[in-house]
Image (cartoon, helix red, strand yellow):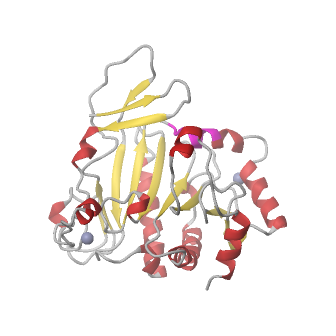
Amino acid sequence: MSEVRRNPFTGEWTHYAQNRNKRPYEFMHKIEGKFIGNEGCPFCGGHEDKTTPPLYQDGEDDSWRIRVFPNMFPTVEKETETILENPFYEQISGRGMHEVLVDTPHHEETIDQFSLAQLERIFIVLQERYCKMMWAEEVKYIQVFKNCGPSAGMSIRHSHWQIVGMPVMPQREDLMRHHMQEEDCLFCKMLTYEKEQGTRIVEENQDFLAITPYASRFPYELWICPKRHITSFANVKTEELKSLAVLFKELLPKISSLRKDVGYNICMIDGEVKGDFHWHIEILPRIGGFAGFEYATGSYINCILPEQAAEYYRTEK
Ligand SMILES: [Zn+2]
Ligand SMILES: [Zn+2]
C-alpha cells in the first residue's frame, strides 16, 4: 500500500510506504553492537538469490559488475490499491516504479574508488533504466539518486543507486522547471555568468562545468552541469556520459577527503518526464546538521561560503 498526500499549505508531497518499515538497517545493527558484516548483505556478489529477480545484470551470477532489480521495499509500487479519496485534501495512489542499481559486487568498495570504466558503465545503465521507466504511464518524474554513508541516509552499506519513477512532480523541481522554461533558460544564463565570474568554478571539461552554486545549501555543495541545454537525463549522449565519469573520478575523492567517513548524496535533478529542463547533478556533502531551523523554515544555515568551497576543490590534490 503506497499513497502520496499533499500539504495544502506548502504544496509539498509526502510518500507513505508502510512496507519500508520492514527494511533491514545495517548501520542500526552496527550501532546496537549486532553488526553482522556482509554475510546477510543482499547486494553482494554470490547473494543474488536474496533480491528480487534482476531487470539487468552484466554477467553471470557471482561475476557481474552491475545489477538492477526492483526494490524489495519500494516507495512507490506498480500495483497498489486505489486509495480512498478525501475531498478536502489532494492525494494520489503511490503508483510508480522503484529500482535498485548495485554498482559493485564488492561489499566494501565505494564509488570514489571505482575505475573510470566502471563509472562510465554505471551512467550508461542508469540512463537505460531511466529511458525504460519514462514511458510508464503512471510515471511523471524520475528521481535518480545515491546515498553514500549512514549520515546521508544509506541503510545498507553496500554501494548502490536508486531510481524512483513517481506519480507526482516534486515541489522543488516543479518550481525550478518554471524558471527554466522562460524565453531563455535561467540555468544556461547562470552558467554563462558563472564562467565570467570564475570564483565558483571548480572544474571544466568539454561537456560539463562543475560549480559550487551561489546559494549552496550544504557546505561544499557541488553541482555538475552540462554546458549545453540538455532537457533530460534521457538526452545525454554516450560521449557526454563518459565525460561526466571523468569529472566524477576527479571530484569524488576530494569529497571523501573533507573528513573521515563523510556522507553525501548524489542527486540527478530533472524535469517532468519528456519535458524541458536543464538536467544536472547535485552532490550534497552531509557535514553539520539538518535540524529544526532547516525543517521549519526551508532555509539553510551553511558555515562554508561557496567561493571557499570552490577554492578547496580547485586546490585539493
Ligand atoms: Zn554487500
Ligand atoms: Zn539551459
Q: Residue at x 72, y 57 (%)?
A: 214
Residue 58, position as x, y percentages in the image: 31, 71
- Vertical comparison of 58 with 278: above or below: below
How many labels sit on residues? 0
Q: Which SS does the magenta portion mostly show?
A: helix
Q: Is residue 206 magenta?
A: no
Residue 208, position as x, y percentages in the image: 66, 68
Residue 189, position as x, y percentages in the image: 79, 54
Q: Residue at x 52, y 40 (%)?
A: 170
Task: Specify whether 76 is left or right of 241.
Answer: left
Task: Kindly tell me whether residue 267 is visible in this rendering.
Answer: yes
- Vertical comparison of 88 with 289: above or below: above
User: Bounds of the magenta span?
Assistant: 169-175
Nearer to the camera, 199 or 53: 199
Q: Residue at x 61, y 66 (%)?
A: 220
Q: Is residue 170 magenta?
A: yes
